[in-house]
Image (spheres, helix red, strand yellow):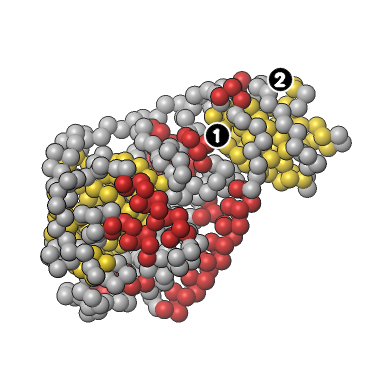
Amino acid sequence: MVGLAAGVVVAQREQANHEKTIQKRREISTLPDTIPAPNGARKVEYQASAVAGKQQFVGVWSTSASLLNVANYYYQILPTNAWQVTSTPITNQNQSAGVITATQENRIVYISLQRNQTTDITTISVAIPSVIPAQPLETTTKGTRTGATSTSTKIAFIANTGVNSDFQNILNLIKNEQADYIVHAGDFDLQSNPELFASTITTTLGEAFPYLYVIGDQDEPYWNSDCFNQKECYTTDMLNRLAANQLELTLPNKDTVQENEQHTNQFFDTYALDLGAVHLVALGLGDFDTSDSGTGATEYAPFITNTFEKSDASVKICVFHETMFEIQVGNQIDSIGWKPFEACREQGALIVTGSDHSYSRSKTIRNYPEQIISTIWSKNDLLRLEPGTSFIVNAGLGGANYSLQERCKPITAPFGCQGEWASIYSINQAAKPGVFFIEIDENQPTKATAYFKNTDAQVIDTFNLSLWQEGAPLTEIKPK
């Protein structure tokens, strides 16, 4: 984004797309559940399909670890006139309800129900993500990096990639740096092609590499497992990778993703999980209402507080695609509100965003709305994380276009605004694609290291973290 006018146009287009997706969420979330899962089965899909001018709804349950074991599937049908529930084991034999078949392609099971309704025959196809893979995936073993210990965790953060040679170079860099996890802060392939994106990752890193997707505004139409894509949605690939690594998500108002029926009948864009010594919270796009009545204030901020208060992780990280104008260096508009920022800071969590197509990293922050930096922890290369302090990294140089430094000039340090920026890397600084890395060792709980490296193997930014431990005195003076 190269100017304010262009930014307004893009923001308007993104707002229109976002409103369409919100309407889709409402339509899906209003579908009633009329029967419990039979025999303790787990609900794996809830999908709508318009066929022959009629709207039909199907719910599918499974009691089997093998998604192709069709004898253990159950289905539920909503006819056009009234609810008439059928709960019968699915077989390949003729049933009074119709003929059931099942096939598998790219770790997705397709179940087709052909049902005779008086004078017409209706066929409904339901795509079921293989959350429990039908065939075992190659698993990864944490801590096998060269020079790494079994207690060491290294996470790579990126955003705004596309699928191109730059993204391939990004993946190669991450592989060479031997990261344990990747967290992608939104705007993935930019082609609405989840299958292509997943296959690109798999080619370089393998199908079981733990890759965390955090939704961006360009990803909404194909994000959720109910996106109706014939192949797969972004969460299909992520859930398979999580299952292969025995990583479990926590969702708002639910203890685990399993207790929320894989979240397939709601919009699954906000979650938390543990990555070694790190507890990470990923936020959705919200409703673009930055007031105290918006999603950021009423849903995201409480979730941040609640999940971090239950965690004793050495490092806490908030990740979301959206941002606020005064805490970025490009032309991104206010889109999430200050409440999530302050909730992360109050819990001593660092923030990673991805909206602006640049890299920027702040000093230690003790007030986000006013961009007040710490007077005690004021160094560029030593940052402090404790309840009441934070810092922000925009890791937006994934390879899909680059932004100018529009704010906080000059373009060389020391930067302007409130003096909050320690590092800025944009078009003005001849930016190239790169990755933000952070590494934590559980055996050294009071410190961590972080750096940004570009695909030419140049380290652009490097710094150390001082980490607070439970029970230790706080060092930062709270702002008035």
Mark 1: few/some/many CA within 10 Å (<14, 14-19, 20+): many
Q: Mark 2 points at which residue?
A: 93
Q: Can residue 401 be seen in this view?
A: no
Label 2: which secondary element: loop
Q: Position of residue 309 (x, y in %)?
A: 31, 46
333 to the left or right of 145: right
Q: Nearer the viewer, mark 2 or mark 1?
A: 1
Secondary element at tag 1: strand
Q: For the point 17% across and 61% down, which residue is it? A: 476
Quarter occupied by the N terminus: bottom left
Residue occupying image coordinates x 42% and y 71%? 333
Q: Which residue is drawn at 48% across and 55% down?
A: 219
Residue 366 image point, x, y percent: 23, 64
Identify the mark at residue 44; answer none if there is no mark. 1
Q: In which quadrant is the C terminus drawn?
A: bottom left
Q: Is residue 360 visible from the viewing direction of this image?
A: yes
**Mark 2 neighbour density, 10 Å: few (under 14) some (14–19) many (20 or more):** few
Looking at the image, is mark 2 or mark 1 earlier in the sequence? Answer: 1
Q: In the rendering, at what x and y percent does residue 312 appear? A: 25, 42
Q: Examine the rendered structure and indicate whether residue 43 appears above or below residue 301.
A: above
Residue 152 % position (x, y): 19, 39
Spot the residue most to the right: 119
Please tell me in which quadrant of the rendered image residue 451 appears. bottom left
Between residues 377 and 269, which one lies in front from this camera angle? 377
Query: Callout 2, which amino acid?
Result: Gln
Pick the residue in front: 199 or 70: 70
